[in-house]
């Protein structure tokens, strides 16, 4: 079965000469939920921006569902890889929730009943159907984040990439988003500093450090390795024992 995501030998330097990635290799299978962990400056954002072609020009390769990321396939790659940014206000700019969720599919050519069905399905998936006529800026932060997820789901992606999905959420909103993410039939790559959230949602984690994959394995094993965590400047909350929580717990 073709992997959702294959990254091979990916290296990248910015125009100022800063080398952000030094040869990244990993594979994510269809339907996996994987956390991407690492300290600030490790190259996580640079890596994510390569997954749908926002950044190009390095060496190595990225394949999404077997398609190489490049100019020839860019429209299809960007449909298949949906990125939910840390600040939902970066993605919400239309007068109503419905219009925000419809924007991507409409731009891709959907109209009429098919477009409305796509919007309704995406809003149902994140529990925001009752808010579709509201202006996004009247919603709570947690609600805006769910709408931002819906704008990506409306494109029916194969891979959902989430940048710090739990940041600035209260405990109830954090739990609600976790329930939504567990319910989705998509591949998930979650970039996060929230290590308990990674353990709760993602059976597998990658640690990106100094531009390379320093570790790849079961989330609980990585978080329970004190030497590994110290070496890559990762710290669990005080008193949190990763062995007390089954990795990726809850419904699949």
Image (spheres, rainbow, N blue to C red):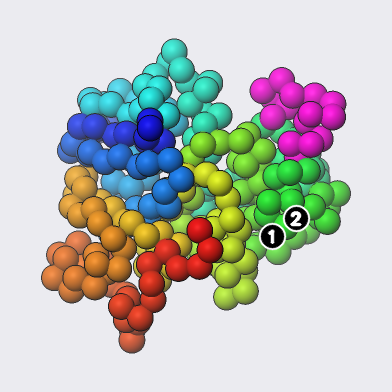
Q: Residue under circle 1?
A: 143
Left or right side of 190 for 137: right
Observer-nearest of 135 and 26:
26
- Residue at 30% x, 78% y: name it: 243
Question: Which of disc 1 and disc 2 is earlier in sequence?
Answer: 2
Observer-nearest of 126 and 168:
126
Q: What percent of the width, then of the height, locates residue 178?
A: 55, 63
Q: Is residue 111 magenta-colored? A: yes
Kindly state the secondary structure of the residue where label 1 is placed: helix
Up the image or down, 174 lies above or below 243; here it is above
Q: What percent of the width, then of the height, locates residue 200?
A: 44, 68
- Residue at 28% x, 60% y: name it: 218
Observer-nearest of 118 and 75:
118
Q: Residue under circle 2?
A: 128
Prevailing secondary structure class for the magenta stretch in the rendered image: helix
Q: What percent of the width, then of the height, locates residue 17?
A: 20, 33
Mark 2 or 1: the one toward you: 2
Q: How many residues crowd mark 1 within 10 Å: few (<14), some (14–19), many (20+)?
A: many
- Residue at 24% x, 32% y: name it: 8
């Amino acid at each position: 079965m073709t992997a959702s995501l294959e990254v091979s030998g990916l290296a990248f330097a910015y125009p100022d000469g800063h080398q952000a990635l030094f040869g990244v290799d990993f594979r994510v299978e269809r339907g996996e939920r994987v956390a991407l962990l690492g300290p600030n400056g490790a190259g996580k954002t640079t890596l994510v921006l390569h997954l749908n072609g926002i950044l190009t020009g390095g060496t190595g390769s990225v394949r999404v569902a077997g398609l190489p990321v490049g100019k020839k396939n860019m429209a299809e790659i960007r449909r298949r890889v949906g990125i939910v940014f840390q600040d939902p206000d970066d993605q919400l700019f239309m007068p109503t929730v419905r219009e925000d969720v419809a924007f991507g599919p409409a731009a891709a050519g959907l109209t009429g009943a098919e477009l409305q069905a796509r919007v309704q399905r995406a809003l149902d998936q994140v529990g925001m159907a009752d808010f579709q006529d509201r202006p996004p800026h009247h919603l709570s932060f947690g609600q805006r984040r769910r709408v931002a997820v819906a704008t990506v789901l409306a494109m029916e992606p194969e891979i959902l990439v989430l940048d710090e999905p739990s940041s600035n959420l209260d405990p109830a909103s954090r739990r609600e988003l976790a329930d939504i993410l567990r319910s989705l039939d998509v591949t998930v790559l979650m970039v996060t500093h929230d290590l308990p959230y990674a353990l709760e949602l993602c059976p597998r984690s990658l640690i990106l450090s100094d531009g390379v994959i320093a570790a790849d394995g079961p989330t609980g094993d990585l978080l329970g390795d004190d030497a590994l965590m110290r070496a890559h400047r990762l710290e669990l909350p005080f008193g949190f024992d990763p062995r007390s929580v089954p990795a990726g717990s809850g419904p699949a």
